[in-house]
Image (cartoon, rainbow, N blue to C red):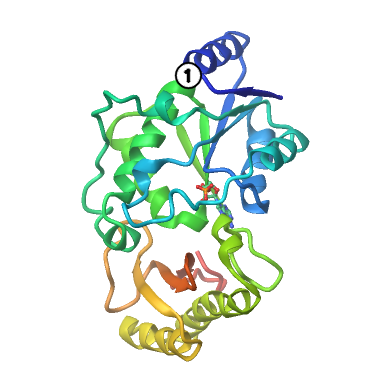
Amino acid sequence: MQVITAIDKMRSYVEEAKSRGKKIGLVPTMGCFHQGHLSLIEKAGTSTDTTIVSIFVNPAQFGPDEDYLAYPRDVEQDRLKAARAGVDVIFAPGLSEMYPESYLTYVNVEMITGVLCGKARPGHFKGVATVCAKLFNIIKPDIAFFGQKDAQQTIVVKRMVKDLNMDVEIEVLPIVREKDGLAMSSRNKYLNTVQRKDALVLYQALTKAKDMIKSGERNAGMIIGCTKQIMDKAGLKIDYISIVNARQLNSLEVISGEVLIALAVWVGRARLIDNIIVNTEVNTMGHEL
Ligand code: AMP
């Protein structure tokens, strides 16, 4: 496994691999690997010939009062885990390599970035879209792999790729959870023992919402009210809980079709996100479509 930090070296590596007919898979990450990252890496390994994992804590997607400096970093462990998982290259550019002093250009996907996490974190998705566009331009992957954990991110990136005619396929993989249901996240490292228990409420609330829909409840306000009660009982500070159309992200009053139930909650200093997709439409066999 190679670790490449320079953009021109990364480009020549890819050019050479492509000249040998290799299909390139990219897994963009901010590092501090857990099983969620590794599931993307494993899929890249089986779907493509060359797996490149980028590690870059992207300042452009953090607000001024957010945890850019505190964000967990563990380069040595990442290197070991990546090598064990069969990664061909870690691309770990430095800050000035990605954003030299003269830097001026950003990618802005409109509308769908103004809701959910985009509402709470203005500018976040501009940073995400920009860094993904840069990585796609540098690495020219055939497939880029993303996790459903960051549901809005997958929709924003897919939209950017479509609108800007980028030649990359976006593959989205399911959320990997701890045995007790907590979605894996690098930010779970911020939690102490009590907070780790409190954090279980996120998945419990989502499961409750899903069960309500499955039992026929279609009033989004009612469901949100119930999930809020669960959070309040646990004393957690809610950033948002929303039920939106799973593709356009527009807010729904009456639930129909494929819906995304997404939430962001503060547990101590960790802002945790989680989501679940529920399809209200059933086929003649009674299964979700
Ligand atoms: P991050 O390093 O947090 O920016 O995440 C890098 C990629 O891993 C993103 O596409 C995330 O959606 C994905 N990811 C993070 N956590 C999980 C998880 N628990 N399950 C699946 N994918 C995840």
Q: Quadrant of the N terminus?
A: top right
Which element is circle 1 on? Answer: helix
Judge whether 281 appears above or below 36 on screen. below
> Residue 241 at x, y = what percent?
37, 74
x 27%, y 78%: residue = 253
Indicate if the residue with disc 1 has its beta carbon within 8 Å of ligand 1: no
Label 1, on which residue? 7
x 33%, y 50%: residue = 124
Q: Quadrant of residue 203?
A: bottom right
Judge whether 5 appears above or below 242 on screen. above
Horizontal side of 23 relative to 238 (left or right) equals: right
Horizontal side of 210 relative to 75 (left or right) equals: left
Q: Residues within 10 Å of mark 1 (few under 14, many from 20)?
A: some
Q: Quadrant of residue 246?
A: bottom left
Q: Amino acid at mark 1?
A: Ile
For this orientation, the residue located farthest to the right is: 84
Q: How many numbered discs, if any?
A: 1
> Residue 44 at x, y = what percent?
63, 36
Depth check: give the residue in front, 278 or 92.
Answer: 92
> Residue 283 at x, y = what percent?
50, 68
> Residue 158 at x, y = what percent?
38, 42
Depth check: give the residue in front, 250 or 236.
Answer: 236
Judge whether 104 appears above or below 192 on screen. above
